[in-house]
Amino acid sequence: MRIFIETMGCQMNKLDSELAAGALRAAGHEIVEDRRQADAVVYNTCSVRQHAEQKVLSRIGADAQRKESGKRLLVAVIGCMAQRMGESLRRKYPAVDVVCSPGRLFDLPELLARAAAGAGGVSLDPARPAGPGEDDIARMDDLDLARDVSAAAGQSQAFVRVMRGCDFFCSYCIVPFVRGPEHSRDPSHVVQEVGRLVQAGRSEITLLGQTVNSYHWAGSGRAVRFSDLLAAVSAVPGLRRLRFVTSHPTDFGDDILQAMRDLPNVCPYIHCPAQSGSDAVLTRMNRGYTRRQYDEFVDRARTIVPGVVLAGDFIVGFPGETQEDHQASADLIRRSGYKNSFIFKYSARPGTPAAKKYADDIPQAVKARRNNELLAVQEEAGLAHHRQYVGKTVDVLVEGPSASAKKTARRKHESSSSPNPPIHASATGVSAAAPAAVQLMGRTTGDHIVVFDGLATLSGRYVNVQITDATSLTLLGCL
Ligand code: SF4
């Protein structure tokens, strides 16, 4: 079968799609880039925001029309929305053939085979408090371990899961219900997977978890903390950069900060969502820390890890958020000096404690205004942060042509394949010139985006870039 996979949502979903693609290839299927060529489409869905779920439903609506007009097509829904809606997805949307939760991806090839034979099917994790059993956890771990490290050859970066699920129960969040209880992976499996990826040419690894710094493993009789895992993974020969996302402020002990300071390949970057700067809102969000504790974490991080770069997340318009609460969030952005923040307007998610307990009482117009105000404060903080680097030389992993270079290349390609292409060198008998520099984009150890001119062949290489200018989101420089 030719299968098209569309991924929505977070990095965890992107990794799940990679694993699902590997399992489907191993079962003899082909993964295609163009949905029009596909015999089956797999939607890897996100339930964190309403918008993401609406997008999937509109895709399913379009597929239903294609099926009604005679197209033979299988539709599978995996990811958080699959677990959240379960059987009801197939009942309400008959075009859906397969529903498979994120904790049972190993069932996907079998479910699609059954659907091709006309049966379809649903495979879901047992609901909390039970969650997946030991066998299912082991089968998911096998899927991680069996990943095809040669896929996406030439790429320098890879994500590696260190844990699944979440036990924090922030009141607005559906993740603990759809991804189940927290389970950390055996550290030796993580190290083994990183080793294979590095041998296959990946030099920058990002460890993934919903609350990655809560990682703990006691399976071998000795407790392994996240700082121990960092030490073990950083020792993999040939690993040049080690990152991790996403962190929770409550589990950030000094041992992790000291590991970041002492292990040379661990990047000095922490994405640690605050969500609000107000104690009243943090309590209703059930975040488990106060504003003072978050400030103390930022101060500790800056003291222990010299030059640490921080990024944040904020939700505006959470139920009951006053203007004072909102100002407290703006103040937190200024105080923390984030490189960037992801700022979202609150939307009630069905099944979450906040949706059951609190009326979504902040008008859309107020949410939109507060969103814009926080973005403006972050823009100022981001500009001040990025300006510190002007005049410095930074180590950059080149990811490839920048978005604007890609756009220019596309336009050139379109005009050269138009019916009346412009006359160019080869058409006039002049030999081709040396490859021209293009605008490249890469990232520093602190996750700054750096834009500079260079040859496209530098993609995947590490270069030194001297920073000459800065915007609120980008460093500009030259090789
Ligand atoms: S820490 Fe909170 S926001 Fe993050 S996944 Fe867990 S419940 Fe959701």
Image (cartoon, rainbow, N blue to C red):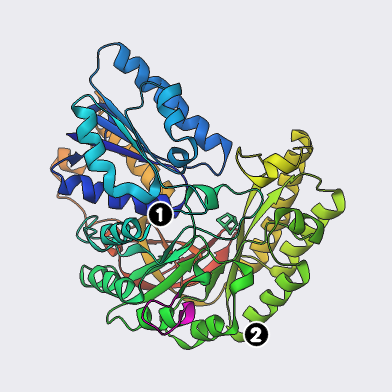
Spatial separation of the CA atoms under disc 1 and disc 2: 40 Å
Residue at x 28%, y 31% (from the top left corner): 35
Amino acid carrying label 2: it is: Thr
Q: Is residue 181 above or below residue 193?
A: above
| Whether residue 464 is visible | no
Q: Which mark is residue 132?
A: 1
Q: Amino acid at mark 1?
A: Pro
Front-most of residues 272 and 435: 272
User: Is 352 situated above or below 246?
Assistant: above
Q: Residue at x 17, y 50 (%)?
A: 432
In terms of image quadrants, where is residue 41? top left
Camera sees residue 443: yes
| Region rendered in magenta | 217-227
Q: In terms of sequence position, does the residue under pointer 1 or pointer 2 come before the other?
A: 1
Question: Horizontal and vertical percent for residue 208?
Answer: 43, 63
Mark 1 residue CB less than 8 A from any atom of ligand 1? no
Location of ligand 1 given as a quarter of the image: bottom right
Nearer to us in this view, 38 or 172: 172
Q: Residues within 10 Å of mark 1 (few under 14, many from 20)?
A: many
Instruction: Report if the beta carbon of the residue with label 2 is closer than 8 angstroms to ligand 1.
Output: no
* Callout 2: SS: helix
Q: Tag count in the figure?
A: 2
Tell me where residue 342 appears, x and y as whole percent: 60, 53
Name the one closer to the observer, 32 or 214: 214
Reading the image, the residue beneath label 2 is 303
Does 328 appear in magenta? no
Which quarter of the figure is the N terminus placed in?
top left
Q: Is residue 120 left or right of residue 50?
A: left
Q: As drawn, is 47 to the left or to the right of 66? A: right
